[in-house]
Image: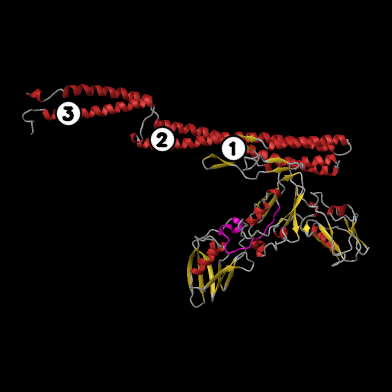
Amino acid sequence: MDLSPIYPGSVPNLLASNRLTQTLQDATAQLTQMGDQLSSGHQFALPSDSPTAAMTTIGLQQLLEQKTQMLTNTQTEQAFMGATDNAMATISSVLNQAQQLISSGIGSTSSPSQKDALAQQAKSLEQELVNVGNTQFNGRYLFGGSQTTNPPFTMNANNTVTYNGDQQTLNSFMDLGQLVGVNVDGNAAFGALTPPIGSDLNPALTAQTQLSDLAGGAGVPMGKISVALAGGSSPQTATVDLSSAKTVSDVENMIAAAFPPGSVTVGLNAAQNGLTISAASGTVAVADLNGGATARDLGLAGAAAAQIIGGDLNPALTLTTPLSALNGGTGIGATAGKGLVITNGGVTKTVDISSATTVQDLVNILKDPSLNLAVGLNTAGNGLAISSRLSGTSFSIGENGGNNATLLGIRTMTGATPLSQLNLGVGVPINATDPIQITRRSGAVVSLDLTGATTVQDALIKINSIDPGNLTATLNAVGNGISITDNSGTGPLTVQAGATANALGIAGTEAGSNPAVPLVGTDVNPGEAPGVFNILIKAQAALQTQNDAELTRLGGLLQPALTQVSTAQSDLGAKEQMLSTVQTNLQNQQTQINQSISTNYDTNFTQVITQLVTEQTSYEATLKSAATVMQLSLYNYL
């Protein structure tokens, strides 16, 4: 019923009352919100209170957490690198002491007892360095590479030192997307590994070769190519999409599948290092599409011809490469009853590799802890890299009656070895005044002048030229060194001792009467670790035996070792400076992010208090109006 005609003003008053009630409710909510803002110090409690500001704040808080973690990383790694820097300063100090010690021990200025005392000092420095090498920081060993939970260095009973770590870099996030290597491994700091042995093994291309392993491991990007057959019974052109191809076999199958069976064939070239494509009849032409380079990089791009023969795709050596694919597919020769002869730490072992079919199999065999080897692939990605973990001793890899070591590229003495490299870099004296004197089995004496020879092979050729086919020199069938055979008679075969013969390791006598038995020379090309441990350990022996020549040689190794340590320290210092800059930037970023969070999330007390006073005044006025309006009812109009 409409009461307005009977009770004028009743409906307007009711509407006004409703509006005032809503206004009071809104004002109460606003006052409550401002009270919460003042008490909590935040502009909102729930994301729904201010969605835009909440989303911005949440994103900023996540970024702040990441930056805070990055700052913690930089501070931790700065301390780790500082500890490493201090340890490396000790290495430099020990090398300088070793230099003085070796200089003092050369010549007659030091008596035998004094030299023994110097040897004991060298032993003490060795122990000090082992302790430095096994330094920990926050439970992590400084110099173990990625092996941070076990001591990197072990001093052995035979006065050698074993490096148990690796050469891996420890990377840490210093900022978003910025990884920095923070460690110095034991080889970089101490020269604890022998220089790696290994050469290009020229692995053959196979159907299973990964396309990512071509071009020395750089890979070949796959795309679309055009293959055109012409002149045959069914000429046609096909676009072949190779983007999903992973192996050489995939390329072969995808191209063949684009044509009638038997129309086109893709296979390996004669050298087994590249591809060929042939038409069953007529010609085939291959081209790239859309500016791509797939056909070119696969060696298949070419104008119309009966066959296109691609060049060397240079597949990288991988752990899955079959040993039979090495050396252009000729393999490494028979392994049964052959294998390798490895001398390390004064112990010679024959290593059976007959069970190995892949590079991984071989690596696993050579990683036998008793061999004390660091084994992997070289940085060029085309050969093995094998080093001894021992300092203070000699290391070599030779044959065991076969060619396995040579064909694996890891024999330490070959025909290509420079004569200047023999005897740990002392070399072979080549001069006409010191010819090699050989007393043959017939009793005849011949002289050999090695003038002009620069490699071991040159020396072998000169010996073999004395009486071709009768007096022969070859590399030892077992181990390393030079063997000489003479069938001129049944008497003893003797190479007279002399500077040149001694340096070649062939001085000596084979006293038997069998001409087929060779005079077997010694290994004169062992390897050694170049660092401070090796220098100190060998200096001890040289001082005790008063070997001035050896002390002089070792003295010559000190400067390269110092340079290596200095270079590693410089690299470390540069990284520390970079981390300091990153740390400053992160701190500045934290400040900026906190300011942005404050703008979006924190209460502006001055602004809120001003609004609160205004809102309270308005609220009070509304209450007064409501008191006047709300007291009216139907009875007021009766």
Local crowd size for mark 2, using a 10 Å CA cut-off: few (<14), some (14–19), many (≥20): many
Q: Which amino acid does label 2 sit on?
A: Thr
Circles 2 and 1: CB atoms closer than 8 Å: no
Q: Is residue 562 above or below residue 387?
A: above
Residue displayed at 86% across by 66% down: 470
Locate residue 317: give its quadrant: bottom right
The residue carrying mark 3 is 16
Residue displayed at 65% across by 45% down: 167
Residue 107, given in percent of the width and then of the height, sits at: 87, 39
Q: Under tag 1, what secondary structure?
A: helix
Q: What stretch is highlighted in magenta?
A: 197-217
User: Label 2 vs label 1: CA separation?
Assistant: 30 Å
Locate residue 73: give its quadrant: top right
Residue displayed at 63% across by 69% down: 270
Residue displayed at 70% across by 54% down: 198
Residue 244, given in percent of the width and then of the height, sits at: 49, 60
The residue carrying mark 1 is 578
The residue carrying mark 2 is 57
Say whether residue 71 is left or right of residue 332. Answer: left
Residue 224, given in percent of the width and then of the height, sits at: 49, 63
